[in-house]
Amino acid sequence: MEESISKSVMAFITITTVVVLFSFFVWVFPGFFFTNDLKEITTAKPYTALELAGRDVYMAEGCVACHTQMVRNLEPERKRYGRPNKMEDDVYEFNFLWSSQRTGPDLTNIGLKYTEGWHKQHLINPQAVVPASIMPQYPWLFEKEIKVSNVIASMQAMKKLGVPYTDTQIENAPTKVEGKTRGDALISYLMSLGVDTREEGGDLN
């Protein structure tokens, strides 16, 4: 029986069609009824030019491979990482950086926990502030300046995807990021995480 199914073209087409239709109705079809009310109820704010540049560094350096940005509604995670994620928190996220690999700590609300100085020291030499850390060192991030043209291109792309950047904000981006290093941008991004979506009584202990 198994052999006859594996050799049957019709069986292959039928099974594939069923899987595709099932996926369509589960993942795609509900999207037709989605209303964009999230932008009306969210407290999330679009990233500044420097924060957005830092987000690009975050992706380029592969931070997403070890860190999640998805606090689950479990007591141990609430106590350690702060309040769980809500749909509206990520209304301006393109693409999502939730990740699933929890090698390092969750960074959803990391902007509420440490100072800029701590982040800089941690990025240059993680073991200097967390001796048991297995995170690599990133001292070179503070030796190379970010490209202004890349930041402008990122903001323009985000605007096309629905982030409400104004033309003035994009035009003024060079003055916000000029002379800043990739490390400065990454710290700015990390310091922004969880700040705009903060809730009374639901943050880090």
Image: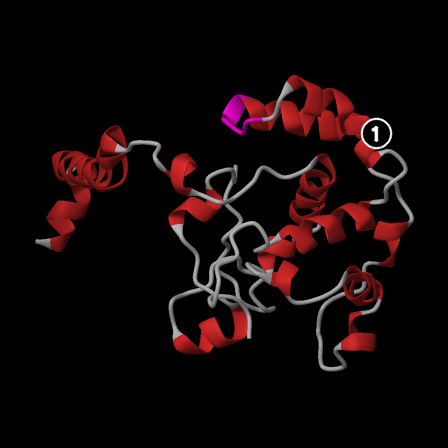
Overall secondary structure of the magenta section: loop
* Residue 168 falls in image quadrant: top right
* Range covered by the magenta-colored residues: 160-164
Instruction: Quickly name the residue at label 1.
Output: 175
Per the image, is 196 magenta? no
Q: Is 53 positioned to the left or the right of 158 in the image? A: right
x, y percentage for residue 20? 22, 36
* Residue 147 seen: no
Give coordinates of residue 2: x percent, y percent.
13, 54
Q: Which residue lies furthest to the left in this view?
A: 1
Q: What residue type is labelled 1?
A: Thr
Element marked by disc 1: helix
- Is 72 placed left or right of 197 in the picture? left
Tell me where residue 29 appears, x and y as whole percent: 22, 33
**Residue at image point 77% right, 24% down:** 172
Residue 57 locus on image (x, y percent)? 72, 45
* Looking at the image, residue 43 lies above or below residue 164: below
Find out whether residue 162 is within the magenta segment: yes
**Image vertical order of residue 96 relative to residue 106, above or below:** above
Write the residue at 84% across / 29% down. Answer: 175
* Quadrant in which the C terminus appears: bottom right
